[in-house]
Amino acid sequence: MDGFEQLIKQLISNPKETECIEFKHNNCEPHMIGKSISALSNSATLYNQNNAYMIWGVEDGTHKIIGTDFDYRTKKIGNEELENWLRSLLTNNANFEFHNVVIDDCRLGLLIIYKAINCTVKFENFDYIRVGSYTKPLKDHSNLETRLWDRIRSSIYEELLALQNLRKDEVLKVLDYPVYFDLMKTSLPSEIDGIIHYLIEEKLIVNQDNGLFAITNLGAILFAKKLSDFPNIERKAIRVVQYKGANKMDIIKGDLGSKGYASGFEGLIKYIEALLPTNEVIKTALRETVSEYPLLAIREAVANALIHQDFALTGTGPVIEIFDNRIEITNPGVPLVDIQRIIDNPPKSRNEKLASLMRRLGVCEELGSGWDKIASSCEVYQLPAPKIDLYQENTKVTLFSHIPYSNMSPEDKIRVCYWHACLKHVCGEQMNNSSLRDRFGLKDSNSASISRLIKDAVEIKLIKPLNPDTAPKHMKYVPIWA
């Protein structure tokens, strides 16, 4: 008996439909399905269930398996496939998957709907909820709405279940557990029970009431051998695309990561490094090949994208795009801190368990030091300062290759000035004309040009004089928030 057959037989053994289980025969009206996904997802959160379900091919009342004509793969609305149509009208945090299952020569349709996280799931901009076995507008049930939002605020993505009802050997088959022990610099236990013990302690897996095990989202996203083994996680795979030139017209190479973030991180960084342009330099009479980008900055920027993404935004994951003159690293979600204060403010992450474990594994730097290292390593290479762009549901960090000062845009120069002042300030120092010239690699003869740049930064209120009464020659500057 496969997993879906066992699941369906367990669900139909319930005496009646519940807030998280709905049975149908052939009714596959698209709007009904959309409203039901919203209602069942929200109800799963409300009633503290990881999943909710719709099953086609079951007789109402008796729950007898009778089969169905419904096939999600052939159902279309106009010329659009059902699943694509549903996703276009549901909010981005709607996470669901269709399956066709055959039991006793009867075809059934199974829709697994994952609980709502971060916010309610809406269909056509309306929230729905299950009241008993009925789908109702959430706005008509204020008491349920209040309880639902309390649940949403307290839910933790990493603790949700990615795969359930597994034996010990099945857990180890899909998780790259040796990597955990390698990164932790801990000996691999010789017995399977010893391995399982560590995985439970780290909340990578949990015991279930039926004596089997479930892999949490934390375990799957970090240590999956193949992300495709976890349907609600696989869309979070990391995509790397290399382009020819400075635009997206011509793709040279594209790759979609298949491993968990911890399992595949070192391989990912090496893959990116191999695509980057390099220069040859002579050191102590020997030629060395040096990347045009600081690898520390790339490593930290990629790790930040993985850690701080918004997992509630389904259907999209981190993307790393490599151009001739820059690298763009985009992740779903926007920062929880003001990007102008990202160097000095205490760090905040919507995925604290993920962030904490990745730091202990050595995948990323100590708490709060990531952006400092990105900005400071770009300073050491005398590259333009990294840039952060915020969009409605995404954050993009851009690392630039070398640009001579004379070719930099005014925006680039201002950004360098601001981040230089920030880095100086967090080190207990202050920026001045001389330090900023050194940052750009300029000679003393460029002092007047740098003074004008500093004046521009002061006027737009990014920096300010430490002491406005100081003589211009000895003036020092700090960020405007200092």
Image (tube, grey):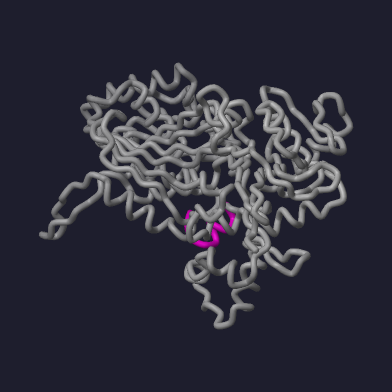
The quarter holding residue 397 reads: top left
Image quadrant holding the C terminus, namely top right
Place of residue 421 in the rendered image (x, y in percent of width and height, measured from the top left): 43, 34
Residue 338 against residue 215 in the figure, above or below? above
Q: Nearer the viewer, residue 288 or 32?
A: 32
Q: Nearer the viewer, residue 96 or 354?
A: 96
Residue 262 against residue 342 in the figure, above or below? below
Place of residue 49 in the rendered image (x, y in percent of width and height, measured from the top left): 76, 49
- Check residue 9 for magenta coloring: no
Residue 199 against residue 445 in the figure, above or below? below
What residue is drawn where x is 56% and y is 53%? 230
Q: Is residue 403 left or right of residue 147?
A: left
Q: Main secondary structure of the magenta part?
A: helix
Residue 341 against residue 311 in the figure, above or below? above
Image quadrant holding the N terminus, namely bottom right
Q: Work out whether residue 320 can be spotted.
A: yes
Q: Residue furthest bottom?
A: 190
What residue is drawn where x is 27% and y is 22%? 448
Give the mark count.
0
- Check residue 356 for magenta coloring: yes
Q: Nearer the viewer, residue 37 or 246?
A: 37
The magenta span reads 355-364
Q: Residue furthest left?
A: 285
What residue is drawn where x is 68% and y is 65%? 213
What residue is drawn where x is 53% and y is 63%? 174
Place of residue 261 in the rendered image (x, y in percent of width and height, measured from the top left): 49, 54
The quarter holding residue 248 reads: top left
Q: Work out whether residue 353 can be spotted.
A: no
Q: Nearer the viewer, residue 423 or 345?
A: 345
Place of residue 25 in the rendered image (x, y in percent of width and height, measured from the top left): 73, 39
